[in-house]
Amino acid sequence: MCPPGSLHDQIAKNWKFIRGYTLKDGHLFLSLMSDGGIYEFEPISQSPAETKASIFGTRWRLTEVNGTAVSTTRVYIEFDDKAKRFSGDGGCNR
């Protein structure tokens, strides 16, 4: 029942395979195991200079999956350092 462009099913399926992250040029890159792909996010609310040191305190919008631009701006993730949790939206479900 998700609208066209939703990445909910793909993200939910791949999330357990994320094995690492990198912050580069203000973007967040989440790598899947065994060269399974890379999710690229950009900060929604902060400048790149503010996001160089930490993934926390920023809402990250998905911009690319495996080098291909996504067609929605609704997909995001954010990390809560205090609660040790993350949340987000796959374009259909939180």
Image: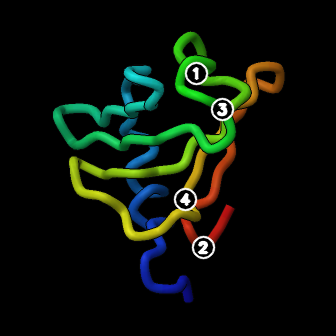
Residue 39 or 63: which is nearer the viewer?
Answer: 63
Residue type at mark 3: give it. Gln
Which tag is nearer the camera, tag 1 or tag 4? 1
Secondary structure state at the residue bearing disc 3: loop
For the residues labelled 2 and 1, the Cα–Cα distance comes to: 26 Å
**Residue assigned mark 4:** 75
Residue 85 or 26: which is nearer the viewer?
Answer: 26
Which quadrant of the figure has residue 23?
top left
Mark positioned earlier in the residue sequence (3 or 2): 3
Secondary structure state at the residue bearing disc 4: loop
**Could you say where residue 52 lies in the image, as x and y percent from the top left?**
52, 15
Which tag is nearer the camera, tag 4 or tag 2? 4
Residue type at mark 4: give it. Val
Mark positioned earlier in the residue sequence (4 or 2): 4
Residue at the top extreme, as displayed:
53
Mark positioned earlier in the residue sequence (1 or 3): 3
**Residue assigned mark 1:** 51
Does 68 appear above or below 26? below
Asked whether the residues under the numbered discs 1 and 4 touch, taking CB atoms below 8 Å apart as contact, a structural biologist would say no
**Residue assigned mark 2:** 92
